[in-house]
Amino acid sequence: MNTESRLPTKNELLSEFFAHWHSPAPCTELIKTGDSCGRVLAADYFSLCDSPVFRSSMMDGVAVKASAFAVGVPDASLWKIDADYVFTDTGDDFPDEFDAVIRIEDVEILPNGGLSFSDDLKSVKPGTLVNPKGKTLAKGSLVGRRGDVLTPGGLTALAMGAVSEVAVCAKPRVVFVPTGSELIPLGTLPARGKTIDANSVMARALLEQMGAEAIIYPIAKDDRDILSELLDKALSEADAVILNAGSSKGVEDYNYTLLEERGEFFIHGVAALPGKPLAMAVIDGKPVINVAGPPVSCFNGLDWCTRAIVRRLLGLSELVRAKVNATLTAPIVHKTGTRYESIIRLNVEQSDGRYTATPVPHWTESPADVLRTNGLYVTKFPPEQTEVGDVIGIELL
């Protein structure tokens, strides 16, 4: 076990863990494109068709014969629909005898069905305001890249290319085991000495957001034999296991000792607050993470540690969150001289194109207030001093 003076940083811990655990290649499954939002593409996909298939109008208007405009804008007052022109909307094809489009704003429809053109209309040539075959999307062009996390826009690109089914990485199965004799499930008001198991709600949401299949076990009592049996069960049906609580040095903190005894690889403690007593192990070739029980500590362990595991199982690289530069409304307080990264939560607001950020310290504020924040900042190692008015880069949650 690491002594406190030699605890690894988050990056050091993950680097050491990944040196001992190599994620298997993701399994794949074939699903409908419309059902694949948020999934990870397991192959490259190319358009099966041209769009437009032949040609299409670039605008709402009338399709005409460009030859009628060879010597200037003609008198079209006696033109007949279907013979001299046809109506067409944006994206529509139109009969072959017409080869140009005039936008509807430059056309007046006369009572007899003839046309009058705007004085702004100067020239009409073959192909005017006409999309040629494949202009929007050419057959064979890339519409989905292996490793893409599919967004609504990505689904649209696949659909435009006539890709109706896609191979995606199977969701990693991740078991979350809430432990603690004091816990009760959500839906019951706690009596004295009891605490609602809120972490399971958080874990399910976070794991699903990460792209995993969350399997939430019922609350487990602080009993070593029960916890050992549950660990066996979880390892038999999951790709990764998370034990919640029991990671520190209390008399009923059995979880990390189970990892230590059974792990092919084991490491305990990280130089990051909150969430320092996190433990990681490889058991039966699978990652097992023991995250701390307090909700903010639990969130942090799930966010930076479990997320890294899930992304490896999906074949994804490290998550890069959007960042903004924000002006601090209060200094970020920390213990000077400690060997810890401080994971600070902040409320970020925008006004007139500028961002401000107010720290919400986990050691003075309610966990509910901390967890409702929308920004995250990890202090440098060792932590640096900050003052009101300093501008720092903040990750948006």
Image: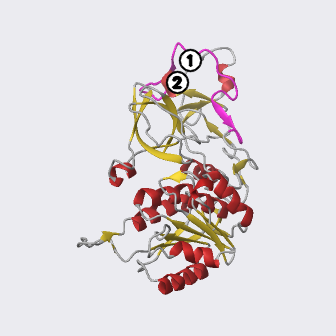
Is residue 347 among what the camera can see?
Answer: yes
Of 156 and 98, the residue lying toward us: 156
Is residue 162 among what the camera can see?
Answer: no
Residue 133 inside the magenta-drawn segment: yes
The region drawn magenta spans 108-135
Question: Left of 262 or right of it: where is 179?
Answer: left
Q: Which residue is mark 2?
A: 78
Q: Residues within 10 Å of mark 2 (few under 14, many from 20)?
A: few
Residue type, numbered disc 1: Asp
Residue shown at the point (41%, 28%) measured from the top left: 388
Residue shown at the point (55%, 48%) measured from the top left: 340
Q: Please tell me whether residue 316 is drawn above or below residue 30 in the rendered image.
A: above
Q: At which x and y percent is residue 198? A: 37, 65
Q: Main secondary structure of the magenta part?
A: loop
| Quadrant assignment, res 121 | top right
Q: At which x and y percent is residue 338? A: 53, 45
What distance separates the C-alpha of mark 2 from that of mark 1? 8 Å
Marker disc for residue 208: none
Q: At which x and y percent is residue 210? A: 55, 59
Q: Which residue is mark 1?
A: 75
Q: Which is more foreground, mark 2 or mark 1?
A: 1
| Mark 1 secondary-structure assignment | loop
Q: Please tell me whether residue 74 is drawn above or below residue 112 in the rendered image.
A: above
Are the two marked residues, 2 and 1, in contact with CB atoms closer than 8 angstroms? yes
Residue 190 inside the magenta-drawn segment: no
Q: At which x and y percent is residue 220? A: 43, 79
